[in-house]
Amino acid sequence: MRAKLIAVIISVATAIVSPVFGQNEGTNETKTEDKLILDLSGLDWLLEVMVIKLEDNSFRVEDIEGIDITEDMIALKTPNNLDLLFYDIETGFTSLCYEFYNTETKINEWLDCVLLPESPTGLYWVLSNDFKNFYIIQNGSYLQMDNFQLKANPANKNEYIVQEDGIDKYVMKELKGKSLDEFYPLELIK
């Protein structure tokens, strides 16, 4: 039902926002366009989910209509061991539930999830351990970090270049003011 509701709203918003759409059906570009259309139409709340903490730190996830979508989610415990990240297989969007694993978070109480900003690469990075470690996630899974290295950008002290297999590939932008244990979109080097 959620997918049908989102599809109908996207179709209507698409007709209003842009006469040309759907050339890249099923790609990350389409998912980015979907999110942009929902943002522009003020309907991005349709992608929000709620999570309830159950016994033994298990969970159930529901959409805005109260439909159980737990099976459509890939869950990932974040590096701070407090938050729970969700990747929605159906929509391709990523959400974060803060303090899920905190011992003070009550069982059988609904918690809000925050939709992460859209990433042009589908990758997110997070700094942890007092800014000593970084992790990259894609589709709700950690990537093999042995393949990635950071190096300072000589042209901009407020950026890091992320090398993949020794090749400059991504950029972490505007590092000043970034928070520890927050997820940020990882962009391609232009």
Image (cartoon, rainbow, N blue to C red):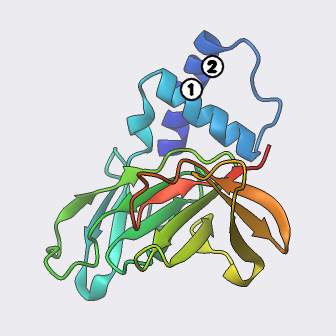
Residue 43 figure quarter: top left
Residue at point 39%, 70% (across, down): 84
Please indicate whether residue 88 sits to the left or right of residue 123 in the image: left
How many numbered markers are drawn? Answer: 2
Residue, disc 1: 37
| 115 with respect to 15 (left or right) | left
Q: Nearer the viewer, residue 79 or 11?
A: 79
Return the residue nearer the eye: 38 or 122.
122
Q: Amino acid at mark 2?
A: Thr
Q: Quadrant for residue 144, please give it.
A: bottom right
Q: Which mark is residue 14?
A: 2
Name the amino acid, label 1: Ile
Question: Which element carries disc 2, helix, strand or loop?
Answer: helix
**x, y (%) of residue 173?**
59, 49
Residue in the picture at 21% in, 61% down: 110
Q: Is residue 171 left or right of residue 49?
A: right
* Disc 2/disc 1 C-alpha distance (Å): 7 Å
> 10 Å neighbourhood of mark 1: few (<14), some, or many (≥20)?
many
Q: Residue furthest bottom?
A: 56
